[in-house]
Image: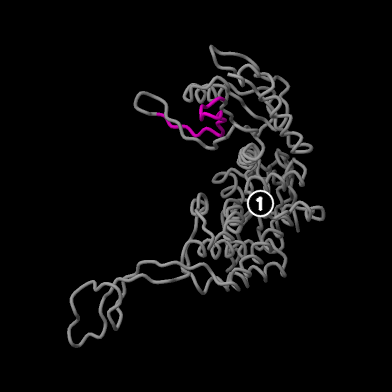
């Protein structure tokens, strides 16, 4: 059974479908701990039914092998796929041509899982990337550098330090761990699940069991010897960032697939700007700034647009919400960012136009709310956003 929950809409579910134990589990794990859902227990006020609301997340939560929650986006699925492509730099896979037949986010997850498994198997056939790693080990002969004096007559091994040529390196550990997480999700159909397990077994024999975080994937450096790992690791980042908390079903552990739409919107806008900003403009994402005489406060600015000389000219903050007007806290935050960067342009970006948009000057800081819409053609929406961003400030751009 599949229960569909649309983003920010409440579903009323009978107790015969979700019993008290699973309802409590959803409340503890996805309401109190994770914030992906808002869960209200059955009572006289709601007809003795569970009231569950998706809180800006989309994906799949497999409760049992026969009962899944599908959290649906409010944006069109094709646009969601395009956002994921941009955010995780998957455009080189040319996925859009094959997305017409995809009906759900789970189908998209499955398509990427099969793609990763296929690429891993291709690399296994060519040979996994290997590197020299330092190792200290007792061996029956001197190898590399001797670590201590010769053994006693009754000892047959000496402790040596030497470089070992091995495939047990982070490049392959990332692949193995990601494939294991996908297999544990139980989201894919049996044929894809089989391909994922086959690829996992092919890599597992060469690497140690290591838990890998997203930080291991971001910022990796590639050479001509492992260049084909870059797209595979981009896929791994996608899967690792969307892996929710695990839970036990009997003796089986299951991993949900959950996309934080606010985070995805932020990544998408950043990557779209990187790909489409006209020269000499360039964008920096997640820049750290310190405020205060002794740097007491630290902030992460979503986006900073710099001119050709590297001077910050715009600070931007994405807000995946649809209020009537900008929150005072958000306005104060973007002003603080602009002040910290000595920047005159402070922009709050929303996915839909605000009924009460903001466009004002505070001293020498121009504060505005702009829209990067997710409703229609994303490329066209991006061009409209750039036009609104730069169009009213021709004099500023010419300085």
Residue lying furthest bottom? 154
Query: How many numbered dots are placed on residues in this image?
Result: 1
Q: Residue at image x 76%, y 46%? A: 77
Q: Nearer the viewer, residue 335 or 24?
A: 335
| Quarter of the picture holding the N terminus | bottom right
Residue 40 appearing in the image: no
| SS for dot 1 | loop
Q: Is residue 398 magenta?
A: no
Q: In this rendering, is residue 34 above or below 228?
A: above
Question: Which residue is disc 1 drawn over?
Answer: 90
Q: Where residue 179 sits: x, y (%)?
A: 59, 64
Please report the bounds of the magenta region as a residue range.
297-313
| Quarter of the picture holding the C terminus | top right
Q: Nearer the viewer, residue 359 or 304?
A: 304
Q: Where residue 6 sits: x, y (%)?
A: 74, 43
Q: Is residue 311 magenta?
A: yes
Chief secondary structure of the magenta span? strand
Q: Is residue 226 left or right of residue 349?
A: left
Q: Where residue 222 sits: x, y (%)?
A: 52, 56
Colouring method of the image:
one colour
Q: Residue at image x 29%, y 71%? A: 161
Q: Residues within 10 Å of mark 1 (few under 14, many from 20)?
A: some
Q: Is residue 93 left or right of residue 312?
A: right
Q: Is residue 301 left or right of residue 57?
A: left
Quarter residue 250 falls in: bottom right
Q: In this rendering, is residue 311 above or below 127?
A: above
Q: Residue at image x 57%, y 26%? A: 314
Quarter residue 184 falls in: bottom right
Q: Where residue 272 sits: x, y (%)?
A: 66, 39
């Amino acid at each position: 059974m599949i229960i569909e929950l649309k983003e920010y809409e409440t579903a009323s579910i009978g107790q015969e479908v979700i019993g008290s134990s699973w309802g409590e589990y959803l409340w503890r794990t996805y309401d109190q701990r994770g914030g992906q859902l808002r869960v209200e227990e059955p009572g006289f006020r709601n007809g003795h039914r569970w009231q569950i609301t998706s809180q800006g997340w989309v994906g799949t939560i497999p409760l049992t092998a026969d009962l899944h929650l599908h959290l649906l986006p409010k944006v069109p699925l094709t646009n969601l796929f395009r956002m994921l492509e941009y955010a995780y730099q998957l455009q080189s896979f040319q996925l859009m041509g094959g997305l017409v037949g995809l009906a759900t986010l789970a189908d998209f997850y499955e398509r990427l899982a099969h793609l990763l498994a296929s690429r891993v198997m291709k690399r296994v056939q060519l040979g996994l990337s290997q590197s020299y790693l330092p190792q200290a080990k007792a061996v029956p002969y001197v190898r590399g550098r001797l670590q201590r004096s010769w053994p006693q007559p009754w000892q047959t091994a000496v402790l040596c330090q030497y470089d070992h040529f091995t495939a047990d390196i982070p490049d392959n550990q990332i692949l193995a761990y990601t494939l294991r997480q996908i297999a544990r999700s139980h989201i894919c159909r049996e044929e894809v699940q089989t391909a994922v397990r086959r690829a996992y077994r092919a890599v597992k024999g060469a690497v140690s069991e290591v838990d890998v975080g997203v930080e291991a994937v971001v910022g990796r450096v590639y050479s001509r010897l492992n260049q084909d790992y870059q797209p595979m690791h981009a896929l791994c980042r996608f899967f690792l960032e969307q892996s929710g908390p695990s839970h036990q079903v009997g003796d089986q552990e299951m991993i949900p697939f959950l996309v934080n739409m606010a985070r995805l919107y932020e990544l998408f806008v950043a990557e779209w700007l990187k790909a489409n900003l006209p020269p000499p403009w360039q964008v920096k994402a997640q820049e750290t700034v310190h405020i205060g005489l002794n740097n007491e406060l630290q902030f992460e600015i979503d986006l900073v647009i710099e001119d050709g000389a590297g001077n910050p000219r715009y600070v931007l903050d994405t807000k995946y919400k649809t209020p009537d007007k900008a929150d005072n806290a958000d306005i104060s935050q973007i002003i603080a960012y602009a002040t910290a960067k000595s920047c005159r342009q402070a922009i709050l970006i929303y996915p839909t136009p605000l009924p009460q948009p903001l466009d004002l000057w505070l001293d020498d800081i121009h504060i505005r709310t702009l829209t990067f819409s997710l409703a229609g053609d994303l490329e066209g929406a991006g061009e409209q956003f750039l036009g609104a961003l730069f169009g009213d400030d021709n004099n500023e751009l010419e300085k």
